[in-house]
Image (cartoon, rainbow, N blue to C red):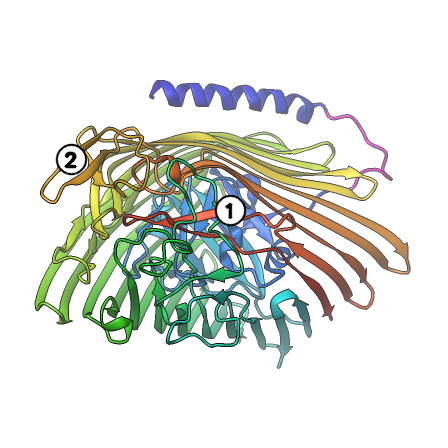
Amino acid sequence: MSPRLSALAASASGLALLIAAPAMAQTAVPAEQAVAIDEIVVTAQRRSENIREVPFAVTAMNTEALNTLSSGGGDILQLSGRVPSLQVESSNGRYAPRFYIRGLGNVDFDFNASQPVSVVLDDVVLENVYLKGFPLFDVKQVEVLRGPQGTLFGRNTPAGVVKIDTVKPGDDFTGFGSLAYGNYGSTRAEVGVTLPASDTLSVRVAGLWNHRDDWVNNAYDAPFAKKDGKDLGNFDDIVGRVHVAWTPTDRLSTLLTLQARDYEGTGTMNRANILSKGSNELNDRFDRDTVYYDGGRNNYQKQQTTSQSLQVAYDFGPATLTGVVGSYQGSSAGNGDIDGGVLGDPVNSGTIPFPSETGTLSSDLIQNTYELRLSSNGDGPFGWQVGAFYWDERFNLVSANFNGFGGIMPTIITDIVQKSDSWSIFGQGRYQVTDALKLTAGVRYTDDSRDFRGQRILGAPLDVTESVGDEQVSWDVSALYEVNDSFNLFARVASGYRGPSIQGRLAMSNVVTTADSETVMSYETGFKARLWDGRARLNATAYFYEVSDLQLTAIGGAGNFNQLINADKGEGYGVEIDGDVYLGAGFSLAGGFAWNHTEIKDADLFVGTCGAPCTITDPTVTVGAPSKVLANINGNPFPQAPEYTANLTLNYVRPIGDDQELFASTDWVLRQDFNLFLYEAVEFRQDTQFEGGLRAGWRDLGRGLEAAAYVRNITDEANILGAIDFNNLTAFVNEPRMYGVELSKRF
């Protein structure tokens, strides 16, 4: 065990002892003051169990928390920072988000990029980043599983899993409807209804309409401008889902799920040179309500996806056999003014060395997944599950550059086809050694392959192919020790794996790059406690991991390339704490904190930089003709990996009689010290960012009515979320203050 890991383990053990003492000798509280917090049940190990029984770090978010974050039109990006060590960001608007856990992620903005964080929706993996922005609606719970999850969830999970479970049909006629309206014409309407058709058949129908008007003015008279003062900022997202549950016998159950999404809106709005050389603060060029675009066609995007899945489970008595078949189909298109300004407009746009307008003429995706699991039943000392999994994907992307002819016609068109498939077999067993000690171990074998073909069909002719493949074994071993009914200790060692990747951004380069598989060894230990007569919950974890052949994406630089590289090693370690407590008098508090230290370890690794416009703090060399400035990134943190994150939610409920109550809730999230890119520059190193929200109102529990007012980004913070790195200081920011009212009815 490394010295760092030993120190972390000692710190966690010491903290555990400090907490265990009051847990093992709690003082009695008068019954009228004791309000127990709810137990949390999760399926992080593919079975339902109390969250304290899971021998690794996992945090769950319930429906109420998710609804609060969705106020004002929020999407899946709002999960960022709401769970310790979770970061979510995107330069692709309201789809194709990028997830990071414990600092490990991928900043690659292309749709064929792979990520080390998997998103699983209702037991079906959403492998492609293209699918991971599927809207959160009618959701029962979101679980964030931290650390490698290769044994049960497969490839591309070395950082963790975001597991989303929607509301399923039940035996009773139940449902809800909500309608919210706010500034910028923001409208969110959501509905979910369970319709029992018979003793064996039940249907859940759910839908979402999320809308916002244009609210940003393009102050440049571009050929495509709408000429009505507001050109950008709108979106319309219409989503529907149908679950059909059929249980013909006590042993057989089936669930058919159909989904569809139709989205159209404005993509990410890059803003040219809103940073100044030597500063990471927004300058006077930044104006939330105004951009200057000579390209991008109003940064439009649109996406349609459909999906079908079928889950069948048969209980044989000693074991249950479960099969899951899923298929997703999608198409999208979009365009953007990537440089974020107007060439030759130094006042409003600053210096722009060359224009960049790129777009997706079409992107089409087909993904199919098949899984079969056999799991033991019963409460005996030994439990197990085994299974097999197959995944295949075909992705076709036709993209264009519009950097000539006044941006009217494309100058380059490329056509990329990527075919991928993966199969695996896995197994996990757990054994109750004593009443207090439980051991769990698992292993998975995976075989991956990926084929790529890229053609330039307008511009200098090009036709390239590339193939990669690998096979890996992932495994984990863990122990859970029950000190008493309210306090558990755990430790886990796990390996993880991200399959080999291909990157071919042929619009700007003739080069196709590849990255070898990255593998992770992770160690973590901690405790999970229920304190103060059940009025509080506290979890803490210390972890250390090392990545071999760390996959990185070198984006931008003066050449505006996007290339895959492997670093020799990567390292991460830190501490995570989360919990909640009932304070009394109607007040409750929930929150989390994480310290995540990450470091690239490769003395010979250099990447391109933005050059003269920014202030590089890494060691550099100048090579080539024309000359290029390269930075040595050895010792740098991973990109988009905040060293500190924290979240806090304070709730208040006041009964006013007759099953009625007033309520108020305020939630805050903070992140501090993170790099936007692989290299370090003063302008692209972010300090402290925070954002808060408030929701308050009245509810009638008897009639299921609720009326509330909300504010998101209550202090109207302008936080830099990302930047565009090719010879200028263009960046993009978070959403503005959103406020409105909401009415809902449950039955």
Q: Which residues are magenta?
A: 26-36
Residue sitting at x 23%, y 52%: 560
Quadrant into which the N terminus falls: top left
Marks 1 and 2, how far apart in space? 33 Å
* Picture coordinates of residue 248, whole percent (x, y): 53, 76
Quadrant into which the C terminus falls: bottom right
Labelled disc at residue 642: none
* Badge 1 element: loop
Left or right: residue 197 versus residue 281 is: right
Dot 1 corresponds to which residue? 719
Is 596 included in the stretch rendered in magenta? no
Q: Is residue 374 above or below residue 393?
A: above
Q: Is residue 527 visible?
A: yes
Most common SS among magenta residues: loop
Residue sitting at x 69%, y 23%: 22
Q: Earlier in the sequence, mark 1 or mark 2?
A: 2
Could you say which is closer to the camera, residue 734 or residue 324?
Answer: 734
Could you say which is closer to the camera, residue 705 or residue 537?
Answer: 705
Q: Is residue 350 above or below residue 671?
A: below
Seen as rendered, the residue at the extreme bottom is 197
Labelled disc at residue 622: 2
Q: Is residue 187 visible?
A: no
* Picture coordinates of residue 459, whole percent (x, y): 13, 70
Q: 10 Å neighbourhood of mark 2: few (<14), some, or many (≥20)?
A: few
* Picture coordinates of residue 435, whole percent (x, y): 55, 32
Left or right: residue 139 versus residue 410 is: right
* Badge 2 element: strand
> Which amino acid, by three-letter code, is at mark 1?
Asn
Left or right: residue 713 versus residue 422 is: right
Residue sitting at x 32%, y 35%: 615
Could you say which is closer to the camera, residue 378 or residue 304?
Answer: 304
